Structures are given as C-alpha cells and as structure tokens.
C-alpha cells in the first residue's frame, strides 16, 4: 500500500473512533444531541442502541488499524467494504450525511488501496 492509501485508511479508522466516542460516551450529552439532532428524551431512550452502534464502529476502526499494522491489503479492503456498506445503509435509512462522512472517505481510501 502506498503512503497516501495508508494515510486515508488511518483517517477512516480515526473517524470511526470518533463515531465510537460520540455514540458510546456523548450520545446523551449536549454535544452528542446537537450532532445527532436528538432531544434529551430521544437520546435517553436510544442510548443503549447508540452504545451498541458505537461498539461496531470501534470494531471497524480496529479492523482497519489491524490491516494497516499487518500491512495486509486484503484485511483493509474487507473492512473498508464493511464501512462502505454501513455508510450507504445509514444514508438510506437514517441520514444522508452519513454517505459523505462515512462511505465517501472509505470509497476514496479503497480506490487508493486498490490502485
């Protein structure tokens, strides 16, 4: 993998660490509610689901980090594909912004890894 590909994969992994923090630790706080556009009541009632979602984002970040650390493009491609699928699904079912913040960076990273 080239240095630009590695850098973008690491950026995608760091984005997913950020998503983990938002969903697991900041979901019910004012910052998290502002990011996700929820009321205090909505945030409280969905906090357990958000924590679960955050955990999955952590798994994606860990997989990408593992693939980069092992210098294994196959692992990186697999986890980028998972990120892309999750981003497209999230954009279709929850919020279109997810496409731009999750799927598009992963698509660009995947293109660089495969180049």
Image (tube, rainbow, N blue to C red):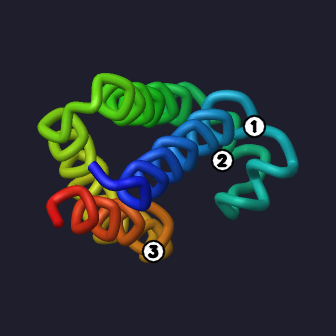
What residue appears at the point 44 percent right and 34 percent down from the top-left corner? Answer: 61
**Viewer-proximal residue among 59 and 74:** 74
Distance between the Cα atoms at labels 2 and 1? 14 Å
> Which quarter of the picture shows residue 26?
top right
Q: Secondary structure at mark 3?
A: helix
User: Which residue matches tag 3?
Assistant: 100
> Which quarter of the picture shows residue 79?
top left
Is 53 on the left or on the right of 39, as rendered? left
Give the mark nearest the N terminus, 2 or 1.
1
> Which quarter of the picture shows residue 73?
top left
Q: Is residue 84 above or below residue 77?
A: below
User: Which residue matches tag 1?
Assistant: 26
> Which percent across, then down, holds residue 48?
54, 25
> Which percent across, then down, holds residue 22?
67, 41
User: Which residue matches tag 2?
Assistant: 42
How dense is the environment of label 2, judged by Cα within 10 Å: few (below 14), some, or many (20 and up)?
few
Q: Is residue 48 above or below residue 109?
A: above
Give the mark nearest the N terminus, 3 or 2.
2
What residue appears at the point 38 percent right and 26 percent down from the top-left corner? Answer: 69
């Amino acid at each position: 993998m080239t240095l630009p590909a590695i850098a973008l994969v690491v950026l995608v992994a760091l984005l997913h660490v950020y998503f983990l923090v938002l969903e697991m630790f900041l979901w019910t706080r004012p910052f998290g509610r502002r990011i996700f556009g929820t009321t205090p009541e909505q945030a409280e009632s969905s906090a357990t689901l958000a924590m679960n979602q955050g955990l999955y984002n952590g798994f994606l970040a860990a997989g990408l980090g593992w693939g980069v650390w092992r210098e294994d493009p196959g692992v990186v491609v697999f986890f980028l594909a998972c990120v892309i699928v999750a981003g497209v699904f999230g954009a279709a079912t929850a919020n279109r912004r997810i496409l731009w913040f999750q799927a598009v960076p992963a698509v660009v990273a995947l293109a660089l890894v495969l180049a």
